[in-house]
């Protein structure tokens, strides 16, 4: 059997290559361990007593699931005492949370969606944790929301953990995108995909078609041309997938290519999109770009967007770079 490389060994080798510092290595290892705890809790399902609603809501106005709250607490507790972090920000918290005064603080900012797709939890569909790491600005000890407002190209690491038939941890530290599979018997992640490459072309798109009538015209035209298949302007047939769990849809795209789209729609014109920039679009955008794909908001590169709010939303087009370019062309030509 070829030599198994654990996440621990992978991170130490990346540190020896000068790709990451000891503190960032520790941060990623702690996040991965927290995800293992979440995986164990999620996999218990109804037997874990943590299904259903928490009876609370988050800043997005969304009902929180018990597992949303529990996953958030697991990540906060795991990252509090290590001395590698200045503050955390989460979809489940209105504002960022500095590391408690009783613990040493470090130079990184951690953002996460602790359990993305949690509406799928109660129907036993794959969900996941998404995380993003930024540097804390020099000289800042008590970070506030404004210190998190950095464009996605400033991320030093990004990843997700997908809780599916197997539990997998996808990671980039700016030198490719890699995936690890959880060996539950040994309680460690093992490298199973090094240097993932997304095919540049695809015949598979992922979108929630029920919103078609609410989209901008170029968005409708782009999808209508996909549906027209080989008789239409694209000259080939396309397949569709929509899991309604971003981590699962993105994992499929990292694994076999495709394009994932959550565009702006006029259901609520005040919202620029459904997905959140800082802890969904940015980390997924870095993972996809590092695997040779592209991530746009329909017109500009997601990682170049200068955030002005911690929980701001953004339209998302990501995946096989030639298909993302095609979708963007429909929008820029319409402009
Ligand atoms: P819809 C899950 O709630 C989520 O934030 C993403 O994981 C997913 O891609 C999207 O929303 C699904 O949205 O409108 O299809 O339910």
Image (spheres, rainbow, N blue to C red):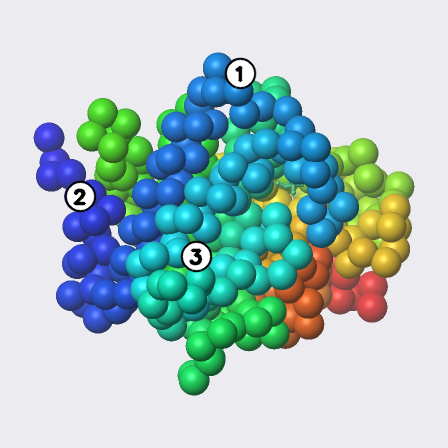
- Please name the residue that numbered disc 1 is placed on: 46
Label 2 element class: loop
Give the mark nearer the N terminus: 3 vs 2: 2
Give residue 291's position: percent from left, percent from top: 41, 54
- Please name the residue that numbered disc 2 is placed on: 5
Q: How would you rate the neighbour count of disc 2 (Cα within 10 Å): few for under 14, some for 14-19, many for 20 or more?
A: some
Q: Image quadrant for the N terminus?
A: top left
For the residues labelled 1 and 2, say whether their Cβ atoms are less than 8 Å apart: no
Q: Residue at x 48, y 20 (%)?
A: 48
- Please name the residue that numbered disc 3 is placed on: 158
Mark in front: 1 vs 3: 1
**How far, Cα to Cα, is label 3 from label 2?**
20 Å
Label 3 element class: strand
User: Does mark 1 have its CB less than 8 Å from ligand 1?
Assistant: no
Give the mark nearer the N terminus: 1 vs 2: 2
Label 1 element class: helix
Give residue 93's position: percent from left, percent from top: 62, 53
Give residue 129's position: percent from left, percent from top: 49, 43
Q: Residue at x 43, y 72 (%)?
A: 135
Q: Nearer the viewer, residue 32 or 85?
A: 85
């Amino acid at each position: 059997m070829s030599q198994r490389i654990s996440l621990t060994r992978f991170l130490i080798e990346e540190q020896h290559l000068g790709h990451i510092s000891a503190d960032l290595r520790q941060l990623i290892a702690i996040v991965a361990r927290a995800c293992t705890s979440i995986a164990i809790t999620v996999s218990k399902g109804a037997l874990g007593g943590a299904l259903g609603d928490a009876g609370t809501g988050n800043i997005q106005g969304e009902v929180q699931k018990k597992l949303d709250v529990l996953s958030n607490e697991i990540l906060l507790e795991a990252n509090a005492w290590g001395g590698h972090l200045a503050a955390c920000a989460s979809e489940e918290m209105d504002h960022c949370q500095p590391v408690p005064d009783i613990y040493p603080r470090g130079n990184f900012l951690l953002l996460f969606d602790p359990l993305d797709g949690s509406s799928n939890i109660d129907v036993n569909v794959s969900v996941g944790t998404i995380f993003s790491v930024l540097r804390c600005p020099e000289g800042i000890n008590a970070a506030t929301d404004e210190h998190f407002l950095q464009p996605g190209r400033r991320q030093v690491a990004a990843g997700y953990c997908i809780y599916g038939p197997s539990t997998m941890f996808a990671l980039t530290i700016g030198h490719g995108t890699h995936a690890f599979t959880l060996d539950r018997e040994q309680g460690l992640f093992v490298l199973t995909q090094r240097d993932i490459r997304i095919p540049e072309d695809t015949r598979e798109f992922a979108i929630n078609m029920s919103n078609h009538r609410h989209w901008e015209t170029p968005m409708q035209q782009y999808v209508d041309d996909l549906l027209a298949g080989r008789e239409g302007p694209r000259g080939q047939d396309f397949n569709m997938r929509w899991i309604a769990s971003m981590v699962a849809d993105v994992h499929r795209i990292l694994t076999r290519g495709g394009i994932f789209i959550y565009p702006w729609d006029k259901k609520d014109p005040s919202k620029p999109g459904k997905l959140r920039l800082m802890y969904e679009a940015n980390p997924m955008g870095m993972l996809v770009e590092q695997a040779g794909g592209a991530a746009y908001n329909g017109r500009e590169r997601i990682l170049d967007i200068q955030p002005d709010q911690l929980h701001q939303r953004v339209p998302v087009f990501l995946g096989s770079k030639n298909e993302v370019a095609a979708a963007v062309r429909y929008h820029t030509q319409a402009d």
